[in-house]
Image (cartoon, grey):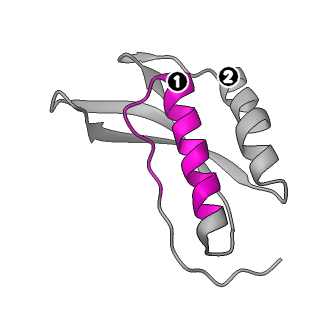
């Protein structure tokens, strides 16, 4: 969530992103959790930062994949990020 090595994505900015980018694409619901992580950037130095983890339960297929990629691109563009992690895995889910 850092921008240029400094904390930059406020909770209000992230909520606005969810409202504008995630909710319209995934109106059936999602979960957002606070997290933290580390990774090596383009300059090969360790970067530690706060993170938001978004959990979505989706059917597998090209439409869901396209929407996920659109959200990742929007996040990178809006918040000047090098990358946005995406993990997909099969799951048995019940509500």
Q: Is residue 42 left or right of residue 29?
A: left
Whichever of callouts 2 and 1 sits on the residue coming sooner in the sequence is 2
Image x and y of residue 13, in percent: 67, 22
Q: Is residue 78 magenta?
A: yes
The residue that mark 2 highlights is: 13
Q: How many marks?
A: 2
| Residue 4 to residue 22: above or below | above
Image x and y of residue 9, in percent: 57, 22
| Residue 48 to residue 72: above or below | above
| Residue 90 to residue 45: above or below | below
- Cβ atoms at labels 2 and 1 below 8 Å apart: yes
Mark in front: 2 vs 1: 1
Say which element carries label 1.
helix
User: On residue 88, which mark appears?
Assistant: none
Q: Quadrant of the C terminus?
A: bottom right
The residue that mark 1 highlights is: 79
Q: Residues within 10 Å of mark 1 (few under 14, many from 20)?
A: some
Image x and y of residue 94, in percent: 78, 81
Q: Is residue 34 visible?
A: no
Image x and y of residue 29, in percent: 81, 57
The rendered magenta stretch, by its main secondary structure, is classed as helix
Q: Is residue 54 magenta?
A: no
Q: Is residue 37 left or right of residue 55?
A: left
Tell me which segment is drawn in magenta. Answer: 64-86
Could you tell me which residue is drawn at 62 percent across and 20 percent down? 10
Could you tell me which residue is drawn at 45 percent across and 43 percent down? 84
Q: Is residue 17 left or right of residue 2?
A: right
Could you tell me which residue is drawn at 58 percent across and 35 percent down? 74
Alpha carbon of mark 2 to alpha carbon of mark 1: how far?
9 Å
Q: Is residue 74 visible?
A: yes
């Amino acid at each position: 969530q850092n921008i240029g090595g400094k904390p930059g994505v406020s909770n209000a900015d992230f909520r606005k992103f969810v409202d504008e980018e995630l909710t319209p694409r995934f109106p059936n619901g999602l979960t957002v959790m606070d997290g933290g992580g580390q990774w090596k950037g383009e300059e090969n130095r360790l970067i530690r930062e706060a993170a938001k983890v978004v959990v979505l339960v989706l059917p597998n297929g090209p439409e869901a994949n396209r929407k996920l990629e659109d959200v990742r691109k929007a996040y990178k563009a809006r918040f000047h990020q090098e990358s946005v992690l995406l993990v997909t895995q099969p799951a048995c889910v019940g509500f």
